[in-house]
């Protein structure tokens, strides 16, 4: 069994790369997280990934379930859980959130690739996954760190997290 998880799907750029390289195909279980409903992700999935079994989860990746404040910045591609990014926030909405560590824990044993682009929330989500031991269920973790957008985190914090994940 193979699983692909896209945490911070946006328009599926990373998934497209894995598909184009022949790594991910219709035999994979594919989960994508994108709480920003302004992006019309359902239509994008239908238009560009219609032949793949993509399961859209319209919730924010976080450390617990429930509801969170979600900021949508001036750029449509810059949205984050409140307080996890330095973007300007002209729009704030309340969205559902998923305990990502629990989500990963509940997945069946499989070869798992995870792309994570969650606009600063990685500094909160990854330590919980490390603590819970669920990071070990991820075989390949491709992550974009957003320390450059945040006053509380530095490149050293990102390097430290990378060492802890390894």
Image: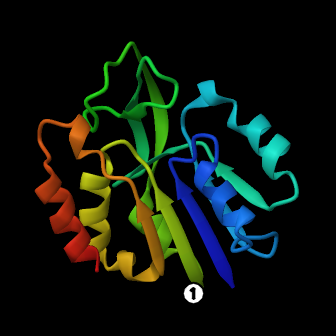
Residue 131 visible to the viewer: no
Residue 51 placement: quadrant: bottom right
| Residue 10, placed above or below residue 103 | above
On screen, residue 46 versus residue 157, left or right, reads: right
Can you give x and y, in whole percent of width and height, for residue 73 in the image? 41, 22
Can you give x and y, in whole percent of width and height, for residue 156 in the image? 12, 58
Colouring of the image: rainbow
Query: Mark 1 falls on what kind of element?
Result: loop
Image quarter hosting the C terminus:
bottom left
On screen, residue 34 versus residue 55, left or right, reads: left
Outermost residue to the top? 90
Can you give x and y, in whole percent of width and height, for residue 99 in the image? 41, 57
On screen, residue 21 versus residue 50, left or right, reads: left
| Residue 7, placed above or below residue 59 | below
On screen, residue 82 versus residue 54, left or right, reads: left
Outermost residue to the front? 21
Q: Residue at x 69, y 85 (%)?
A: 1
Dot 1: within a 10 Å radius of its alpha carbon, few (fewer than 14), some, or many (20 or more) residues?
A: few
Residue 129 visible to the viewer: yes
Q: Badge 1 is on which residue? A: 109
Count of numbered labels shown in the rendering: 1
Q: Residue at x 44, y 70 (%)?
A: 141
Can you give x and y, in whole percent of width and height, for residue 52 in the image? 81, 60
Residue toward you, 24 or 39 = 24
Q: Residue at x 67, y 50 (%)?
A: 56
Residue 46 placement: quadrant: top right
Q: Residue at x 42, y 38 (%)?
A: 67
Residue toward you, 97 or 152 = 152
């Amino acid at each position: 069994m193979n699983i692909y998880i896209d945490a911070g799907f946006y328009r599926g750029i990373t998934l497209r790369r894995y598909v184009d390289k022949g790594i991910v195909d219709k035999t994979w279980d594919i989960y994508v997280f994108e709480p920003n409903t302004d992006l019309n992700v359902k239509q994008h999935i239908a238009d560009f990934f219609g032949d793949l079994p993509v399961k859209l989860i319209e919730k924010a990746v976080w450390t617990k379930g429930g509801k969170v404040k979600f900021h949508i910045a001036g750029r449509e591609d810059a949205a984050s859980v409140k307080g996890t990014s330095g973007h300007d926030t002209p729009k704030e909405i309340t969205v559902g959130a998923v305990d990502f560590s629990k989500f990963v824990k509940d997945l069946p044993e499989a070869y798992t690739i995870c792309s994570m682009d969650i606009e600063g929330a990685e500094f909160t989500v990854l330590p919980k996954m490390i603590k819970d031991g669920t990071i070990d269920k991820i075989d390949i973790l491709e992550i974009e760190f957003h320390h450059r957008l945040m006053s509380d985190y530095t490149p050293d914090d990102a390097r430290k997290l990378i060492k802890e994940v390894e």
